[in-house]
Image (spheres, rainbow, N blue to C red):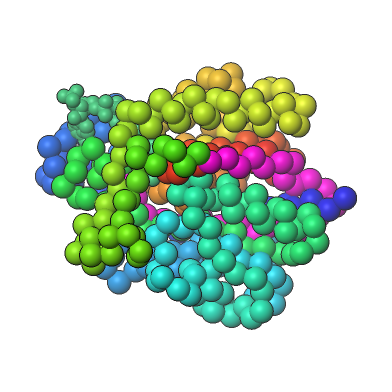
Amino acid sequence: MTYSRITGTGGYLPEKVLSNHDLEKMVDTSDEWITERTGIKKRHLVSDDQTTCDLAEQAVLGAMEMAGKAADDIDLIIVATTTPDQIFPSTACLLQKRLGVHGSAAFDIQAVCTGFVYALGVADKFIRTGAARCAVVVGAETLSRIVDWTDRTTCILFGDGAGAVILEASDEPGILSTHLHADGSYESLLTVPYGISNGLDKVLEKEAFINMKGNEVFKMAVNTLGRIVDETLEHNQMEKTDVDWLIPHQANIRIIQATARKLKMSMDHVVVTVHEHGNTSAASIPLALNEAVRDGRIQRGETLMLEAFGGGFTWGSALMKY
Ligand code: ACO
């Protein structure tokens, strides 16, 4: 049986940092409120000339180096992003050109904060079926471009960044299962309600911003993530105690703590970056994974649970042996 296995990780954060104290000067908020309600202390933001593809490229180069892979080895590129550089070509195709890869499949996936888990699920299926052997899977976002910097209920939450993995065919697991879900009926709770074929004028006037009913999204996220943890463990006939590390989407420390409680897991076994990065949407899980792999916390053979919830609503999980 063929499994897909992570052989390299990478991450990139833009240099510019915006602290809670910086935000105090921009909107009616305080470091105390943001820290208490979200856990966030700072976030990284792109400069005017940086794009999502720029961030993705840096993250992928790090992952390729760790995995010892060259451009010729890659036969699949998937970029999870809600903030692509252009209408087309896809960010994955732009990235393919930068990497010097020719002829591989390359496409974007849009599932907002669940994007990386969706991309991992799709890449895993390509590899399991023999359609690919070495995939680049990236979550990359420049969410700061769709944030209303005068809206204190959203602008304190988001940041920019990219994280990537190299996923390779292996006889050993590997990804054990992925679980992907969506329910579009909740659109009104979390949306950027304009785009190319609906409200293009708003996009051109730079008025297409994230609109979120935070409190309602919060409750849905906590309940849904609790359920998906159960679904994932049941599918694999595993117990909560079998999971070594929880690598959650980094939206809010209180949501992360609630999922850890559900797993009866000490916060020492949860990878947390939300205080440093804010919510980087599709980039948050691979950024957290990369950090814990590179600082030696996550070791080969350990069992990892990845989970995310975001706009759509979309939600998903992946269970794997690292
Ligand atoms: N500073 C100070 N006060 C604020 C701020 C702020 N930045 N923002 C809101 N408040 C006020 C509100 O106006 C409200 O005041 P009121 O009681 O006088 O009306 C009060 O604080 C409480 O507001 P709530 O919205 O109830 O605060 P809550 O504790 O729910 O925290 C938050 C808000 C952080 C947004 C939280 O609801 C949350 O994290 N939601 C989930 C986010 C999420 O997971 N999104 C999914 C992924 S994102 C994606 O897919 C793009």
The location of residue 251, given as percent across then percent down, is 40, 38
| Horizontal side of residue 190 vs 293, given as left or right | left
Residue furthest right as drawn? 1
Of 151 and 164, the residue lying toward us: 151
- On screen, residue 188 above or below 14: above
For the point 59% across and 22% down, which residue is it? 263
- Ligand number 1: quarter of image: top left
Is residue 193 inside the magenta stretch? Answer: no
Q: Which residues are magenta?
A: 158-182
Q: Quadrant of residue 29?
A: top left
- On screen, residue 7 above or below 152: below
| Horizontal side of residue 154 vs 248, given as left or right | left
The location of residue 117, given as percent across then percent down, is 58, 47
For the point 53% across and 63% down, which residue is it? 108
Of 133 and 208, the residue lying toward us: 208
Number of numbered discs on residues: 0
For the point 59% across and 59% down, which residue is it? 137
Q: Quadrant of residue 298?
A: top right
Q: Main secondary structure of the magenta part?
A: strand
| Horizontal side of residue 240 vs 2, given as left or right | left
Q: Quadrant of residue 48?
A: bottom left
For the point 71% across and 41% down, which residue is it? 177
**Quadrant that contains the C terminus:** top right
Residue 298 visible to the viewer: no
Is residue 173 inside the magenta stretch? Answer: yes
The location of residue 225, given as percent across then percent down, is 53, 30
Of 39 and 223, the residue lying toward us: 223
Residue 309 visible to the viewer: yes
The location of residue 105, given as percent across then percent down, is 65, 71
